[in-house]
Amino acid sequence: MKTLKFTKMHGLGNDFMVVNAIEQDFDPLAAPLAQWADRYRGVGFDQFLVVEKPSSDAVDFRYRIFNADGREVEQCGNGARCFARFVADKGLTDKKEILVETAKGIIVPKLLDNGLVTVNMGKPRFMPSEIPFVPAHGETEDALTHIVLVGLESVPVSCVNMGNPHAVILVDDVEAAPVEHWGSAIESHEQFPERVNVGFMQIEDELSVRLRVFERGVGETQACGTGACAAVVAGVRNGLLKAGAPVRVTLPGGELFISWEEGGDVQMTGPAETVFEGELQYS
């Protein structure tokens, strides 16, 4: 039997099982992650985060993310904040600003004196090939919104890649939005060959939105950091939100602040908290 030490963390209720693979031998590809994700028979989490040594001296750490279904994914914004809090709390770094290698490039979390964490999430991408997304016949490559058919309904979506793929839908009332129905249908829609995270955004004013996110491989979560980034980017591009200013994104689990202006990097600020430390055995 193998023994694994882990930490349970969350960012606005988006929860994680975090493992230090620098100081203990661990291969996530050989571990029963989907079993551990079970909230009744396992630890329970939305994503599994792995802290590893970097592949080069140019960065401080490597950050790997696995969804509750055991599939490795490219990015997780709430997880990035928890990652930064974890490496600081465990004494793995004394830096306030950390260079972190991900599957889709380098991100830069910054630990603030007030306990929050700001993460430079890099530049969003919009071309269908970068999402990836297959536009319907006749749609232009650079369209601000695309149409996805859900049954007989035509659903306008704004496609944004924040290191992982997102489809953002504008709704009048986020509480009444068909999150489960449209979310599950669009997540695995044939126009998204690598599946997609689906966000439902209600605009309150140019500096405030409400958001629910159906995450691929997970379902609806309490919060989604990259989803909040994608939503604000889509709102700014469509002229609905103020460019360059911190936009408050209210999710079921709490608030994030996202700022972005055309051509720049997306900045995300929010909390990261430790829940408990644990140890388990597995074969």
Image (cartoon, rainbow, N blue to C red):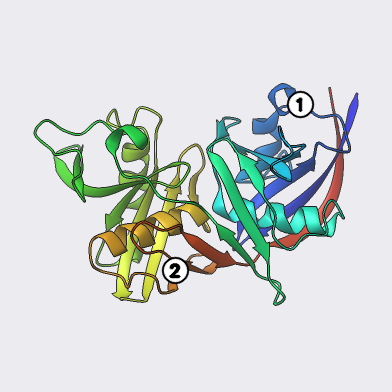
Q: Quadrant of the N terminus?
A: top right
* Residue 206 disc label: none
Determine whether, in the image, residue 164 is placed left or right of residue 152: right
Residue at 35% x, 27% y is 193
Question: Which picture quadrant has residue 187?
Answer: top left
Q: Is residue 143 visible?
A: yes
Q: Which residue is mark 1?
A: 27
Q: Nearer the viewer, residue 88 or 188?
A: 88
Task: Indicate whether 210 appears above or below 107.
Answer: below
Residue at 32% x, 38% y is 185
The amino acid at mark 2 is Val
Query: Could you say where residue 69 lies in the image, as x and y percent from the top left?
Result: 57, 33
Q: Nearer the viewer, residue 212 or 240?
A: 240
Determine whether, in the image, residue 100 is placed left or right of residue 71: right
Total number of numbered discs in the rendering = 2
Mark 1 lies on a secondary structure that is loop
Mark 2 lies on a secondary structure that is strand
Q: Nearer the viewer, residue 62 or 274?
A: 62
Q: Which residue is mark 2?
A: 249
Task: Indicate whether 131 appears above or below 121.
Answer: above
Label 2 Cα crowd, 10 Å radius (few <14 / some 14-19 / many 20+)? many
Query: Could you say where residue 234 lies in the image, as x and y percent from the top left?
Result: 31, 57
Task: Indicate whether 219 appears above or below 237.
Answer: above
The amino acid at mark 1 is Asp
Q: Quadrant of the C terminus?
A: top right
